[in-house]
Structures are given as structure tokens and as C-alpha cells.
Image: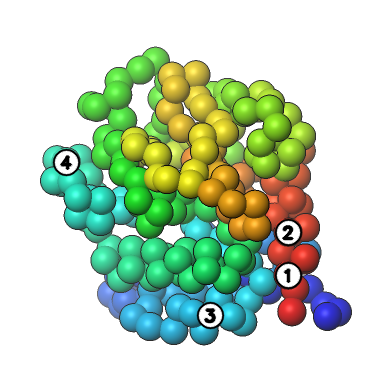
Amino acid sequence: MTGQPIVAVTATSEMIRGAPRVRLNEAYVNAVTASGMIPLVVAPLDTGFAEIVARVDGLVLTGGEDVAPARYGAARHARTGDPHDARDRTEIALLTAAREARLPVLAICRGLQVANVALGGTLVQDLPSERPSATTHDRSDARTARVHEVRIAGGSRLSAATGAEMITVNSSHHQAIDRLAPGLAVTGNAPDGVVEGAEWVGDADWWMLGVQWHPEELVRTPPGWDRALFAAFRERVAAVHR
């Protein structure tokens, strides 16, 4: 089929200026369109997940709220943010449908966390209190600054996508993968060992790659790693373009 591939990009919802609104940071839209894809923004929903997956060529799971600890059988930590149950439900259902359809998935920040939960893993709910280290992971004040290194496993999809085994990234999170879901492999780590990249290795015919940083905020910076990551996703998406 000719034309640009279409990818579903998940969004959140919240009260803004006194009204409930669907919200997505524009950086995701810009990164997707700059890579030659058309973003289809998906709000938190109650149904229609398989139908969405059937009509798009890829899925981007975006950053945002903390995943509800009940989703992975844990009690809520005092520093865990209020959950967004509709968003959790939507993204878990979309990830499940994408896996069944073998639709390429790029999972970013919360997206990696929710994918790990959807596939059977758990999360560290608050890194500063549960896994204190010299590496500061919540640098939301510097979304386009590269604040720490990530070591990438050689031979991984993440290494192939970025073209590197050591990069520097931004960081805007206080949660991270704890117990890894069956079928996933860790392919990137921060200097303190926090998981920064994971990908599906359960079988060869599903391309699912997740990163803990925010590559969409870095595609206009001089290093090419993040542009290359979106380009690799686009290549996989193009292969299933309907």
C-alpha cells in the first residue's frame, strides 16, 4: 500500500481549565511525523481495542502517570501517584491486542513500565526511597538534557536501532521495572543498574522495544540515537503497512 503508515499513540485525560480533556505532549506527535508516520491519538477508552489495532500499523505507548500497583499485585507506596484506571486499562488492552496481531510497539517511559506489567512483571514504585543511588532519574526540569549514560546490550534490537552500545539520555521518572516480565529481556541499564531498555524475545515475530527515557524530546538534538530509534520503529511499521 502507498502512503504513510499510521500508528496509534496513547494519550491521557485530565481536568484542564475546568473541563475534562484528552492530553498528549506534542513532542510525540512531532517525533512520529518527522519519522514519516501519521499519529492517531488514542484517548483512554472502555472498548474497541482490537478494532484500533486492526486499523493501524504500529503502537506507541507514551509516558505519564504511575501504573496502579494493584495491576501487579502490590500495595500502594506512599509516593506512588494517583492511578488513571481508564488509561491503564486502555494501554494494557492495546498492548495485548498488538501482541496477538504481531503489531510493532515502541514503549516510552511509562509505556515500558505498563508493557512490563501487562506481560506479567512488576515495578519499583519509588526509586529514591526504594533504590537510592547517585544517579538522579527524575529530571523533569531538563527534558531535553542528556543527564546520564545508558549501556546497551550488544546484539540487541535497541543496539541495532540506536547504532550504539553506550549513549546518554534524558530522564523523567521515579518508577522503573522491578521483576521483568516473562518474554522480555533487559537491553539497557543506567549506571546504577536501573532498567533503561527492554525488548520482546519470547519469539522472533513480534517487534516490541521499550525505553525508559524520552527519545521524543531528543530527536532535534545533535546526537542521532533517538532519531535512529524512531527510524527503526518506522522501518518495522512500514513492513506491516496495510
Q: What is the three-letter code of the residue carrying label 3?
A: Ile
Instruction: Give the image location of residue 49, x and y in percent.
Output: 45, 78
Q: Quadrant of residue 21?
A: bottom left
Q: Are marks 1 and 2 in contact (CB under 8 Å)?
A: yes
Instruction: State the quadrant of the N terminus.
Output: bottom right
First reached walking from the N terminus: tag 4 or tag 2: 4
Instruction: Give the image location of residue 238, x and y in percent.
Output: 77, 66
Q: What is the three-letter code of the residue carrying label 1?
A: Val
- The mark tally for this picture is 4
Q: What is the three-letter code of the residue carrying label 4?
A: His
Rounded to the nearest whole Å, what is the CA distance between mark 1 and mark 3? 15 Å
Task: Report the residue at 40% width, 54% height from top.
Answer: 119
Disc 4 crowd rating (10 Å Cα; few below 14, some 14-19, many 20+) is: few
Instruction: State the quadrant of the C terminus.
Output: bottom right
Q: Nearer the viewer, residue 87 or 19?
A: 87
Q: Which residue is mark 4?
A: 77
Q: Nearer the viewer, mark 4 or mark 2?
A: 2
Task: Report the residue at 56% width, 31% height from top.
Answer: 188
Rounded to the nearest whole Å, what is the CA distance between mark 4 and mark 3? 34 Å
First reached walking from the N terminus: tag 4 or tag 1: 4
Q: Which mark is residue 23?
A: none
Q: Which mark is residue 240?
A: 1
Secondary structure beneath dot 2 equals helix
Q: Which residue is mark 3?
A: 52
